[in-house]
Image: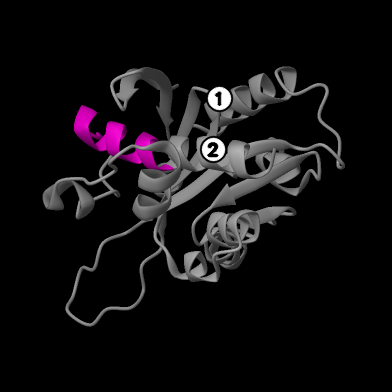
Amino acid sequence: MARLYEVTFAGIHNIRASVTPSAEAAAMWIESAYKGSRSSTPNNPQVVGLDTKLLPELRPGDDDHPVALLLLCIGKNCLIFQLLHCNTLLPLELNIFLADPRFCFVGVGVREAANRLHREHALRVSETVDLRDAAAQKTGLQCLRQAGLEYLVKNALGVDLAKPEEVQRSAWQQRELSLQEVAYACADVFASFELGSRLLS
């Protein structure tokens, strides 16, 4: 079903991560997300961190990098869905969740991630907010539209998201992820959730 991990963000947040290729396990995580978001409405949506990790470059100059992992985060609960290893149809619950206007999916480059999910898996992400645009609108600093997640998190949350080069270049298509890789993946999507919650409040 799902492998469960507990990782730490910034030394203070304990994050529970479910890592799975199972459509059934992903559906169970989504069911739990709905239970915790019963008061959400299209006018007051629940913020969800969304990120993807791509298949690394296998040949020099290869521009085809399919999505290996779909990352979702609400609060301190993260789902790492191993799309490349899902050997059944993707769960209907995932389609419904991503298209539900009661949820707002946030991240840096989130629209590009949503477009890739639609192109590769016919998943439609209904409501997205790029954190760069949200930060620029909140502060009036238009230069933030070109910022990366690390810069935004450092300035807004006071947390350094710098990661070892070898982890950034991980082979995300492997079935077994190391604890360090799980922690890295969770850090990005949890930071997106935290930043989105502040910027959109």
User: The N terminus is located in which quarter?
Assistant: top left
Marking on residue 181: none
Q: What residue type is labelled 1?
A: Gly
Q: Is residue 36 above or below residue 188?
A: above
173 or 106: which is nearer to us?
A: 106
94 or 135: which is nearer to us?
A: 135
Q: Residue furthest front?
A: 140
182 or 45: which is nearer to us?
A: 45
Q: In this view, does 162 lie above or below 157?
A: below
Residue topped by disc 1: 75
- Give me the residue at 42% from left, 31% from top: 20
- Give me the residue at 25% from left, 35% from top: 177
Q: How is the image coloured?
A: one colour
Residue range corresponding to the magenta coloring:
176-188
Labels 2 & 1 near each other (Cβ < 8 A): yes
- Which percent across, then down, holds residue 94? 66, 40
- Which percent across, then down, holds residue 188? 39, 43
Q: Could you tell which of marks 2 and 1 lies nearer the N-terminus?
A: 1
Q: Is residue 59 magenta?
A: no
Please identify the dominant SS of the magenta region.
helix
Marking on residue 193: 2
User: The C terminus is located in which quarter?
Assistant: top right
Q: Does the magenta stretch include residue 183?
A: yes
Instruction: Say few, some or many: other residues with alpha carbon within 10 Å of mark 2 (under 14 / 14 to 19 / 20 or more).
Output: many
- Give me the residue at 29% from left, 43% from top: 161
Q: Which amino acid does label 2 sit on?
A: Phe
- Which percent across, then down, holds residue 19? 40, 29
